[in-house]
Each structure stands twice: as structure tokens, then as C-alpha cells.
Image (cartoon, grey):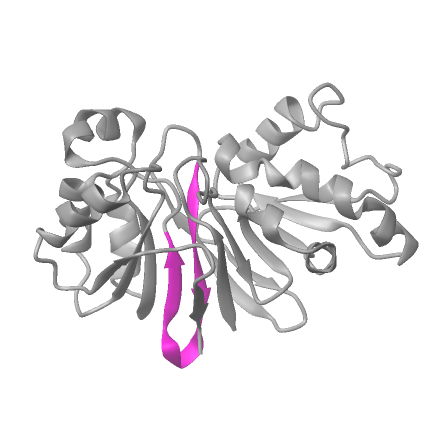
């Protein structure tokens, strides 16, 4: 299995694309602006979309994906793309995006009987088994300003690939991770320490709070930092480097390929 990083920025600017990861070729984890770099053939291969929460930088490619592949999927008689998320997130998508005002409701198009999108609710702690390769993906707790989750992909002997998505300090996450063999951890750090109060209010991490979180995880884990705001990569990574953490820490970059055994 592989995870290809399509986007990992906290916002947009030239060269910066928001959160999106492609597991193998058929499972999209979050749907930020990074999805735009995929070819039409690659978009056609996506059968599952996992959404961590309802904020725009993580969902905005779902409606555009639906519009891009509609005609070809119908012609090939492919089944619906399954969009997996918390019930609160699916409600937000239905009411605020797929409402026939902002965007057509592709959960009823081209027909209610054979829609392009199917919303599939999950719960924290649930293990999803997706695709013909039976990938196991656990839904993890996240602590954000809206209902949110992270995801852990079972990489077998290589350990779990963990994506925290957007979260502030979250004891429940570390309680669970201490009972998992974590191989790779993708964790957000949205602000520098100068904006620690803004990070607290918006329930994101800054380097200081990141250090507190990571010290709860024993061993040496390959840690990648995501969701840094455009233009702040150098300063935020310099602050993280001064934390003297037990884990090797690097910044994630679009185009990175992470192998899961």
C-alpha cells in the first residue's frame, strides 16, 4: 500500500494545496485542493472518499470530483462514489454544499435510485474495510471546532499510518495510539508559537502544544508535519526543531509517497 500526498498546506498560495491524500489509487482521504492535480483517469479510479471534518479546505474537491467524473462513471455503469464521514459532517455537506444552491445534489443525480455519490456515516472507533484489497482504516478521535476525526490505516508489519487531521490537544487520541504500532504519523501544526492563543481558540496545534502531544507517544515514530500556513514553513519547522523531541520530525510535502508495507 502507498499513500500519495496530494496536498498538505493549511491554506492556498502558489505551490500550496490543502489537505488530501490518495491511498493506493481508489481511496481519497480528505478532499482539499491537492485533488486538482489528478488526471481524469485517476479521478475515475476513486471509489471511496473519507472526510475528516466539514471545513472547506478538506471538502471542496468533493463536489468538483463528482461533476468531473459523472458522465464517464454513468457510461461505464460504475457504482456510486462512497463518501464516508461522521453524521454531522454529512449533514453539513448536504445542507451547505449539495443543496442545489451552492452545488447540485449528486446524492440524487443522475437519479435518486442510481446517484453518483452515496453518503456513508461512520463513528469514532469504527474500523472500515474498503475496496477489493480490504484495507483496514480506523476512525480516530480529533478535537476541533466542529465534529472531526483522524484516520489510521493498517500497514501490517510496517505499523499503522496515522493522520490526525485538524486537531488541538487531544488526550483520547494518544490513549488509542499507545495501543497501536504506529509506523508513520502525519500531524498538524497550523500556527507558530507567536500565535499560540489563536491555535488554542481554533483548536489547532502550534510547536509548543505539538511537543506536549508527541511526548505522549513512546518509541521513535516517523513524524511528518502538515497544515502549516503558507509562508510560515521555515519559521514553524525551526521552532519544532528546537523542541528536542524523541521522534524524527520532517515537514510533509505534496508529491511525497509514504509506503505502508
Q: Position of residue 70 (x, y in %)?
A: 82, 45
Looking at the image, which residue is at 68% across and 59% down? 42
Q: Residue at x 32, y 60 (%)?
A: 185
Left or right: residue 95 versus residue 201 is: right
Q: Verify whether residue 156 appears in magenta.
A: yes
Q: Is residue 5 above or below residue 100?
A: below
Give percent across and percent down for residue 79: 81, 55
Q: Is residue 32 left or right of residue 221?
A: right
Residue extending furthest top? 101
Quadrant in the picture for the C terminus: bottom left
Q: Magenta segment, which residues?
A: 148-163
Along the line of sight, the residue nearer the viewer: 127 or 227: 227
Provide residue 4's location: percent of width, then percent of height: 50, 62
Residue 207 in percent (x, y) is at: 17, 43
Residue drawn at (45%, 45%), measured in percent from left and top? Answer: 15
Q: Is residue 157 magenta?
A: yes
Q: Residue furthest right?
A: 75
What's the residue at 39%, 38% (across, down)? Answer: 10
**Which secondary structure dominates the residues rendered in magenta?**
strand
Q: Quadrant of residue 38?
A: bottom right
> Is residue 176 visible to us here?
yes
Q: Is residue 37 above or below residue 107?
A: below
Decide if residue 54 is in sight here.
Answer: no
Q: Nearer the viewer, residue 48 or 56?
A: 56
The image quadrant of residue 67 is: top right
Amino acid at each position: 500500500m502507498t499513500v500519495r500526498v496530494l496536498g498538505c498546506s493549511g491554506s492556498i498560495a502558489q505551490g500550496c494545496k490543502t489537505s488530501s491524500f490518495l491511498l493506493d489509487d481508489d481511496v481519497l482521504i480528505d478532499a482539499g485542493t491537492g485533488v486538482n492535480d489528478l488526471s481524469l483517469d485517476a479521478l475515475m479510479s476513486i471509489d471511496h472518499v473519507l472526510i475528516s471534518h466539514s471545513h472547506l479546505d478538506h471538502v471542496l474537491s468533493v463536489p468538483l470530483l463528482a461533476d468531473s467524473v459523472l458522465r464517464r462513471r454513468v457510461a461505464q455503469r460504475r457504482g456510486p462514489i462512497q463518501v464516508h464521514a461522521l453524521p454531522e459532517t454529512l449533514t453539513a455537506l448536504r445542507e451547505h454544499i449539495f443543496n442545489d444552491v451552492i452545488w447540485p445534489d449528486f446524492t440524487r443525480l443522475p437519479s435518486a435510485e442510481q446517484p453518483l455519490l452515496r453518503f456513508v456515516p461512520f463513528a469514532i472507533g469504527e474500523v472500515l474495510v474498503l475496496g477489493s484489497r480490504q484495507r483496514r482504516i480506523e476512525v480516530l478521535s480529533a478535537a476541533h471546532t466542529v465534529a472531526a476525526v483522524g484516520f489510521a490505516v493498517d500497514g501490517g508489519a510496517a505499523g499503522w499510518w496515522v493522520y490526525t487531521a485538524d486537531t488541538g490537544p487531544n488526550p483520547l487520541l494518544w490513549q488509542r495510539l499507545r495501543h497501536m504500532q504506529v509506523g508513520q504519523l502525519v500531524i498538524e501544526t497550523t500556527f507558530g508559537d507567536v500565535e499560540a492563543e489563536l491555535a488554542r481558540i481554533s483548536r489547532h496545534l502550534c510547536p509548543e502544544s505539538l511537543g506536549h502531544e508527541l511526548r505522549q507517544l513512546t518509541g521513535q515514530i516517523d513524524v511528518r508535519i502538515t497544515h502549516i500556513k503558507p509562508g510560515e514553513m521555515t519559521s514553524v519547522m525551526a521552532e519544532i526543531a528546537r523542541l528536542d523531541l524523541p521522534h524524527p520530525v520532517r515537514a510533509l510535502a505534496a508529491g511525497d509517497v509514504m509506503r505502508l508495507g
